[in-house]
Image (spheres, rainbow, N blue to C red):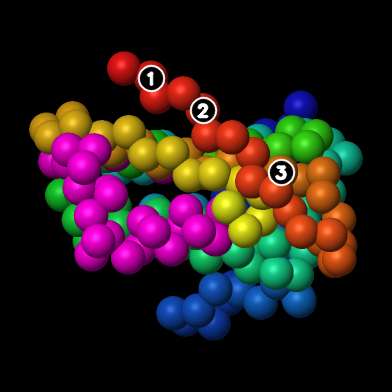
Amino acid sequence: MASHSPSAHPIAPPAGRLPGLAQQDLWATLAWQVQDFTERSGLRCAASIDIDPGVCAPLGVRADAICGIFQEMLTNVARHAQATEVLLRVCARPGDLTLLVKDNGRGAPPSAFERFDAHGVAGMRACAGQHGGWLQIRSEPGQGTQLILSMPLDHAVHSAMPVVARPRPEKIA
């Protein structure tokens, strides 16, 4: 099990843009996103990137989807959470990638994430589902918010077969 620090990746993307996945792998791009958010948000961030040796990063549209969802997760914290601390975790194991974003912000009732105007949440869930993954949100007013993205890594990236979404985990009280 190898643990990678975002600062261990020499990444210098163009200002205001995600680094192109054609030039680097998903792990480096996620590390850059963590580092960029930590530097720009002004929030206290605890971050960990834990990639098992030999786990291959997905490419193409799946990698783009993962980066886009992660960016939206981070953007939501910056825009809505009113947090002072954020926990960021990237964990890749054979067959599975998990991204966790947890803040100590204002939180919201679970129904807030199901509203018709919660376009960002709906988009993240739809995108995750299209690639066989799921997004779980846990939040209560005054208790912060936790977002977990789980994406399978065992499907071929350019497969002609449709990807079937995995079942969502049971709600934990």
Could you say where residue 39 lies in the image, as x and y percent from the top left?
38, 59
Question: Rounded to the nearest whole Å, what is the CA distance between mark 1 and mark 2?
Answer: 8 Å
Residue type at tag 3: Pro
Is 110 contained in the magenta span? yes
Q: Quadrant of residue 167?
A: top right
Q: Quadrant of the C terminus?
A: top left
- Asked if marks 1 and 2 touch (Cβ < 8 Å), the reply is yes
The circle on residue 152 is: 3
Magenta highlight range: 100-128
Q: Which residue is mark 2?
A: 169
Secondary structure at numbered mark 2: loop
Taking the spot 76% from the left edge, 45% from the top edge, the residue there is 153
Neighbor class of circle 1 (other Cα within 10 Å; few <14, some 14-19, many 20+) is: few
Q: Earlier in the sequence, mark 1 or mark 3?
A: 3
Taking the spot 86% from the left edge, 55% from the top edge, the residue there is 156
Residue 29 visible within the image: no
Q: Which residue is mark 1?
A: 172
Residue 168 visible within the image: yes
